[in-house]
Image: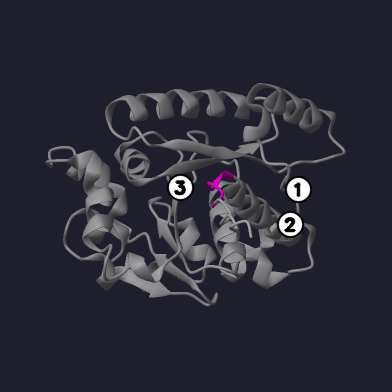
Amino acid sequence: MLANQKGGVGKTTTAVNLATALASTERVLLIDLDPQGNASTGLGVPRAGRGDGSYALLTGQRELAEVVRPTAVPNLHLLAADADLAGAEIELVSEDRREHRLADALAAGEGEVLSRFDRVLVDCPPSLGLLTLNALVAAHAVLVPLQAEFFALEGVSQISRTLDRVRRSLNPGLELEGIVLTMVDRRNNLSELVSADVRAFFKDRVFDTTIPRNVRVSEAPSHGQPVILYDVRSAGAQAYIRLAAELLKRERARRPKTPKARKDAP
């Protein structure tokens, strides 16, 4: 999942474009859990044409198989944010297992639907409400996009404390996948200072790949496309392709190595 309690850090842009880049080698499902629905729009699904989506899944009105749809990106499917998702925070408060609604719905669809995918990404709202909490309970790991500016550091400290609380009470296996620096402007000394501070504190948790400020990245959502489809040669598109490659490389490095079979001596 991708989360940051501060808005405007490139979270949804990263979710859409990382999912697109990963779909070149994997089967990916992107869940839009943000009531703003920008991830859905960025993949070419306008608000008027979404029908049932993540709200219907969380409230038990639909099963996962009924609300997952293909996108224009090969190997990338979407669970869109439907219009009623904004009311889910209030409606779920009185429900049993309210923090586990997404985890339960995904578990129910594990055999029929989730087996079709190699990876599930969740785009969360920029707040620590019940929707984000549902994503944290369902997730194995959290990727935190961080804008390279001073105030964004506060968002990282907040999400770190939140992860600790969720581990203690709801999801002991939750891990911090890493931090991705976004909207980096190499001409700006502040970007460099923030990057250095973040790397000094989080060390190898910070991805080597950074996402630059790029006009094409900003333009792509208005065309209903990830920047990788809109202009694959742009600096932003190439950065997200490198980010996906680095993520896969990190995951391979963490896997336990299978010992080689020992040949019997003659």
Q: Which residue is mark 2?
A: 236
Element at label 3: loop
Q: Residue, x 56% and y 44% (percent of image)? A: 254
Which amino acid is tagged 1? Pro
- Counting from the top left corner in percent of width and height, residue 16 is at 55, 59
Which amino acid is tagged 3? Met
How busy is the neighbourhood of tag 2: few (under 14 within 10 Å), some, or many (20 plus)?
many
Q: Which residue, as the protein is rendered here, is positioned at the far right?
A: 187
- Counting from the top left corner in percent of width and height, residue 83 is at 32, 59
Q: Is residue 158 above or below residue 207?
A: above
Magenta-colored segment: predominant secondary structure: loop
Disc 3 from disc 1: Cα separation: 21 Å
How busy is the neighbourhood of tag 1: few (under 14 within 10 Å), some, or many (20 plus)?
many
Residues marked 2 and 3 touching at CB (< 8 Å):
no
Element at label 2: helix
Residues marked 1 and 2 touching at CB (< 8 Å):
yes
Q: Residue, x 62% and y 34% (percent of image)? A: 205
Disc with the residue nearer the chain's start (1 vs 2):
1
Read off the magenta span: 254-258
Disc 2 from disc 3: Cα separation: 21 Å
In the image, which disc is placed on residue 212? 1
Question: Does the rendering let one see residue 160?
Answer: yes
Give yes or no for residue 69 being in the magenta stretch.
Answer: no
35 and 57: which is toward the camera: 57
Q: Is residue 194 left or right of residue 51?
A: right
Disc with the residue nearer the chain's start (3 vs 1):
3
- Counting from the top left corner in percent of width and height, residue 61 is at 16, 62
Disc 1 from disc 2: Cα separation: 6 Å
Quarter residue 120 falls in: bottom left
Element at label 1: loop
In the image, which disc is placed on residue 1? 3
- Counting from the top left corner in percent of width and height, residue 63 is at 21, 66
